[in-house]
Amino acid sequence: MEHQQKAKLVLEDGSVFTGYSFGYSGNTAGEVVFNTAMNGYPESLTDPSYFGQILVATFPLIGNYGVPEPNPVGGIEQNWESNRVHIKGLIVSEYSQNYSHWNANRSLGQWLDQNRIPAISGIDTRMLTKRLREKGCMLGKIMVDGDTDWYDPNVDNPVAQVSVNKPITYGNGNKRIVLVDCGVKNNILRCLLRRDVQVFRVPYDYNFLNQDFDAVLISNGPGDPKANTKTIKHIQRLIERDKPIMGICLGNQLLALASGANTYKLSYGHRGHNQPVRMNGTNRSFITSQNHGFAIDTSTLSDEWEVMFENLNDGTCEGIRHKAKPIFAVQFHPEASGGPNDTEFLFDEFFNLVDKK
């Protein structure tokens, strides 16, 4: 049995939730957000978009299938969405200390302990989620022993802390795709490489405009998109060219800002594997995986752009496209890991645009 030391979550509004510590026995602080996914916690915990956040898992049982062992292939980890855990802490209702899965090599608690990530079980996550929905995302602290300072991951640009620090090339296909890494999930790389291309992965602020390439994909990532001023300037110059561009999540917001539109912070964001979106102008709807806290203000889009997808829960923008150029972006994750895979066809749409050039 893993230890049952008391711990508490304190929110900036003064709310206190008491439970039991598992994982690393220590204090931490960050922005508290919730995720509605039923599974995929190894992928979520290693998603760079969660950098600096304390993640609340709303599904009642977490840890039952353990954590898979590392499996890097061609420089890309196959079982995780990056090479490390990015959350600051984890909150669950019930933690399964006994795990069972064919490729698990440790418990969730052991993995968190090894990565010095505190976690709490025994929390009423339904009540906590309702508070976050009513009040919006708040700063929080996990305290096992004593107190700790508040930490707001949005004060500094978190993208700079999750992007690669030098270009990396993958694959040797005929088409060369620049991947602007703002905190890219590994499954985006996998989806690209399955389509037999060469991927030139560059830091978020890297000036790639003088490089030879066929198209550009702007990745997901954490934080306020407006903090990435260099990236936005590069995208502005890129839009002037006739190159195919695809954006995902943060990439959607960066593309909008580069076009002259505005973005705003959502109250509690969209995080989970069950967000319904509709393709505008059609009756086609899709269940999507999402992880973001900001959105595009569609009233600020210029006449050259149009909304491509909308969220069926709250009507927010889930994607934009240029009316004349081969450019589009989506707020959700078409590469979703672990699932759903309803919108992976958008990578094929992207490469249809590439093949036409």
Image: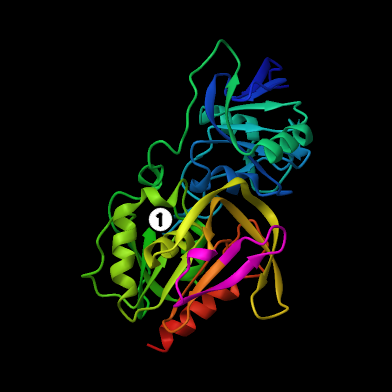
Q: Is residue 2 above or below residue 183?
A: above
In this orientation, does residue 291 appear? yes
Q: Position of residue 226 (x, y in %)?
A: 40, 51
In x, y percent, where is residue 201?
35, 61
The foreground one among 199 and 228 is: 228
Asked where in the image residue 105 lies, by quadrant, the reply is top right
Residue type at mark 1 is Gly
Up-down: is 235 above or below 65?
Answer: below
Q: Is residue 191 magenta?
A: no
Q: Secondary structure at mark 1?
A: loop
Magenta range is 298-318
Q: Which residue is mark 1?
A: 75
Please tell me how many numbered marks the rendered image carries.
1
Q: Is residue 315 covered in magenta?
A: yes
Question: Residue 166 at x, y = what percent?
Answer: 27, 53
The vertical placement of 223 against 122, above or below, is below
Q: Quadrant of residue 275?
A: bottom right
Residue sitting at 75 percent across and 37 percent down? 130
Residue found at the far bottom of this picture: 356
Q: Residue at x 64, y 44 (%)?
A: 41
Residue positioned most to the left: 210
Q: Which residue is pictured at 64% across the width and 35% down the height?
A: 108
